[in-house]
């Protein structure tokens, strides 16, 4: 079954990295830190912020169309040929010994206030749509992080609780086995203790699985690995 889910061909040998599942060790930070990280790391939040900046630039570009466009240019030409005699006459053309230049200024104004005003209103409307989405996106991300964080805390507490329960059940089983061997406990009592230990052991490893899964969900909500943030 594991080969099938991993997409491996039949006959492939799969070696598990660990013989049993262990709880990932992590010291959870305050919720506010994870929420702040999510606002920095989540791709959809960065996409929204980038979209807002782009729309703002478009609005500014459309607003600038109300103003004329001023263009200025200049040109300078200089030629010097020591072996060619300089022509001092004002009416003679001498491209080899010459210094000349010019400056030009242009003004373009596509004056269409009605059309420009409509385009500006359209771009401003698109920008306002993104502005209105921002608080909902922020609130949604915070809710996702909060939910994942609380589930991780609860899963961590469950692991600790079942670990203590498994330790107590193991001690009870040991005492019942010892009591049965010396005749102070019946076989049914030892079997009852064994059944209780087996159940709490199963519950413990299920809690470990849920704990590790909750940490993965928290990392997904934050947009960054949480295990590497251990002090």
Image (spheres, rainbow, N blue to C red):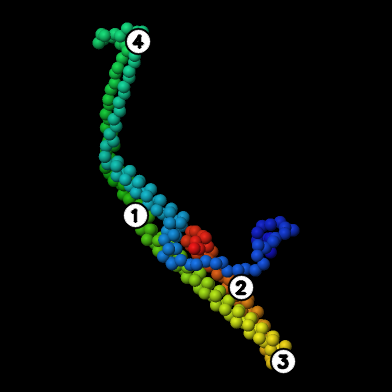
Q: Is residue 57 above or below residue 197?
A: above
Residue 183: mark in rendering: 3
Residue at 58% across, 69% down: 23
Q: Is residue 165 left or right of residue 59?
A: right
Secondary structure of residue under mark 4: loop
Instruction: Tell me which label, 3 or 2, sits earlier in the chain.
Output: 3
- Provide the residue designation for mark 2: 205
Write down the residue under mark 1: 128
Q: Circle 1: is it few (<14), some (14-19), or many (20+) Cα within 10 Å? A: some
Secondary element under disc 3, as helix, strand or loop, is loop
Where residue 163 appears, x then y in whole percent? 58, 76
Q: Give the alpha-carbon distance from disc 3 to disc 2, as whole Å.
A: 33 Å
Number of the front mark, 1 or 3:
3
Distance from the alpha carbon under mark 3 to that under mark 4? 127 Å
If you read the primary sequence from the N terminus, does the residue marked by circle 2 or circle 1 appear first? 1
Visible in this render: residue 186?
A: no
Q: Is residue 47 above or below residue 88?
A: below
Q: CA distance from mark 1 to mark 3?
A: 82 Å
């Amino acid at each position: 079954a594991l080969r099938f889910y991993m997409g491996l061909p039949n006959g492939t040998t799969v070696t598990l990295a660990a013989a049993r599942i262990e709880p990932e060790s992590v010291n959870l930070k305050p919720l506010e830190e994870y929420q702040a990280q999510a606002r920095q790391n989540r791709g959809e939040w960065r996409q929204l912020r980038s979209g807002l900046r782009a729309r703002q630039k478009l609005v500014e570009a459309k607003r600038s169309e109300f103003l004329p466009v001023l263009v200025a240019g200049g040109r300078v030409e200089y030629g010097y040929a020591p072996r060619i005699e300089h022509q001092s006459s004002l009416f003679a053309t001498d491209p080899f010994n010459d210094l000349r230049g010019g400056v030009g200024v242009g003004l373009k104004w596509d004056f269409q206030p009605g059309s420009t005003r409509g385009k500006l209103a359209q771009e401003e409307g698109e920008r306002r749509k993104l502005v209105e989405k921002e608080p909902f996106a922020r609130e949604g991300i915070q809710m996702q992080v909060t939910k994942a964080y609380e589930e991780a805390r609860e899963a961590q507490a469950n692991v600790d609780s079942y670990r203590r329960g498994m330790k107590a059940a193991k001690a009870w089983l040991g005492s019942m086995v010892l009591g049965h061997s010396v005749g102070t406990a019946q076989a049914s009592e030892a079997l009852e203790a064994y059944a209780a230990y087996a159940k709490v052991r199963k519950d413990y490893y299920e809690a470990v699985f849920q704990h590790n899964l909750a940490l993965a969900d928290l990392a997904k909500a934050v947009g960054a690995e949480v295990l590497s943030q251990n002090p």
